[in-house]
Amino acid sequence: MKNIKLIAFATIAGLFLSACGGGGGSSSGGSTPPPSAAVMVPSCGIGIADVTGKTIKKVENGAVAKIRHFPGGGKKACMIKGQAEII
């Protein structure tokens, strides 16, 4: 009787642990960077960044960004002077 209880308990415990994913590692699941990882806005001479739905935060006083708005609601930005980050 004790063996049956032990087998039943082990089976139930195994099911609970396997339902959690149990793999260790991060729980982020996707390829989205963590919130603390800000991306710098590129210089206009180098490229442009898609900033649709994001916020641009100045890193330096006097920073100037060029932002283009598109008919579909998209926005792209690049830095004319100074540095800023996309958060």
Image (cartoon, grey):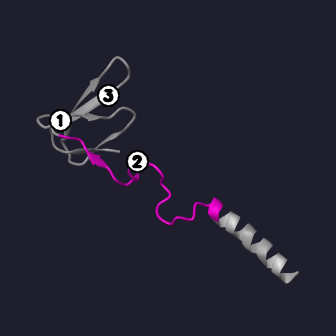
Picture disc at residue 47: 1
Q: In front: 36, or 20?
A: 20
| Image quarter of residue 80 | top left
- Dot 1: element: loop
Q: Is residue 21 magenta?
A: yes
The residue lying at 69 percent from left, 64 percent from top is: 16
Residue assigned mark 2: 32
Q: Amino acid at mark 1?
A: Gly
Q: Which mark is residue 31?
A: none
Provide residue 7's location: percent of width, then percent of height. Answer: 77, 75
From what the image shows, is residue 86 above or below residue 10? Answer: above
Above or below, 62 against 74 in this view is below
Quadrant in the rendering for residue 13: bottom right
Dominant SS of magenta comes to: loop
Q: Residue at x 19, y 40 (%)?
A: 42
Which region of the structure is painted magenta? Answer: 18-42
> Which quadrant: the N terminus?
bottom right
Identify the mark nearer the N-term, 1 or 3: 1
Q: Residue at x 68, y 68 (%)?
A: 14
